[in-house]
Amino acid sequence: MKQLFLAVLLCLSSIGYCQQKETGYPASQKELEKKIIALDKEIFDVFNNCNIEAFRAFFTEDLEFYHDKGGMTTSRDEMIAKTKQNLCSKPGWQIRREPVEGTLNVYPLDGYGAILTGEHLFYVTEDGKEQLTGRAKFTHIFLLKEGKWKISRILSYDHHGVE
């Protein structure tokens, strides 16, 4: 009976470790970092150009976005609508996000995802003149599902102006 109890206990305690790695999950930390940082660049190249439909494809439907100034967003559709309305609908006005060099860090969620943290700068172009307007920290949780990386959770915080 003790052996059966120990076997069951061992199985239950190792369930998290028995998950099969998602197909396409990078084999090394260096490969994971390269993949996630390249994906971050791709996402924000699309964002910076207000390509809303392409931007939508980078997020899970059940996206949660926590913003220290703008509040909470609880779905991809809500986030896309807010982006379109607030950032991509003003004639002669455009926002650009750039990561701060040396601040990006990637942490594995072994076999199924990754966490990207860092800082980014925001620039606003108005009437053809670009100006640095803010800096903030962020955390993105990426999930790998069916071979596609998508952001499922976003924390955007410590927004402040820059001099």
Image: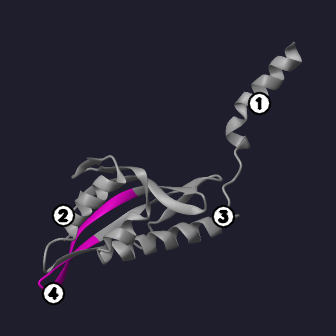
Tag 2 secondary structure: helix
Callout 1: SS: helix
* Label 3 – label 2 distance at C-alpha: 35 Å
What is the crowding at mark 3: few (fewer than 14 residues within 10 Å), some, or many (at least 20)?
some
Q: Could one spot residue 5 in this view of the protein? A: yes
What residue does disc 3 label? Answer: 24
- In front: mark 2 or mark 4? 2
Tag 3's secondary structure?
loop
Q: Quadrant of residue 30?
A: bottom right
Horizontally, residue 81 falls left or right of residue 144, namely: left
- Where does the image place residue 2, in percent across and percent down from the top left? 86, 14
Single out the mark in the foreground, 4 or 3.
3
For the residues bearing labels 2 and 4, Cβ distance under 8 angstroms: no
15 in relation to 54, above or below:
above
Residue at which label 1 appears: 11
CA separation in Å, label 1 and label 2: 50 Å
- Which of the two labelled residues, at mark 3 and mark 2, occupies the earlier sequence position? 3
Rendered-image quadrant of the N terminus: top right
Residue at image point 33% right, 72% down: 47
Of badges 3 and 1, the one in the foreground is 3
Label 3 to label 1: alpha-carbon separation: 26 Å
Q: Are the residues tagged 3 and 2 within 8 Å (C-beta)?
A: no
From the image, tell me which residue sits under label 4.
Answer: 128
Dot 2 corresponds to which residue?
86
- What is the distance, in whole Å, between disc 2 and disc 4 at their CAs? 19 Å
Chain-order first, disc 4 or disc 3: 3
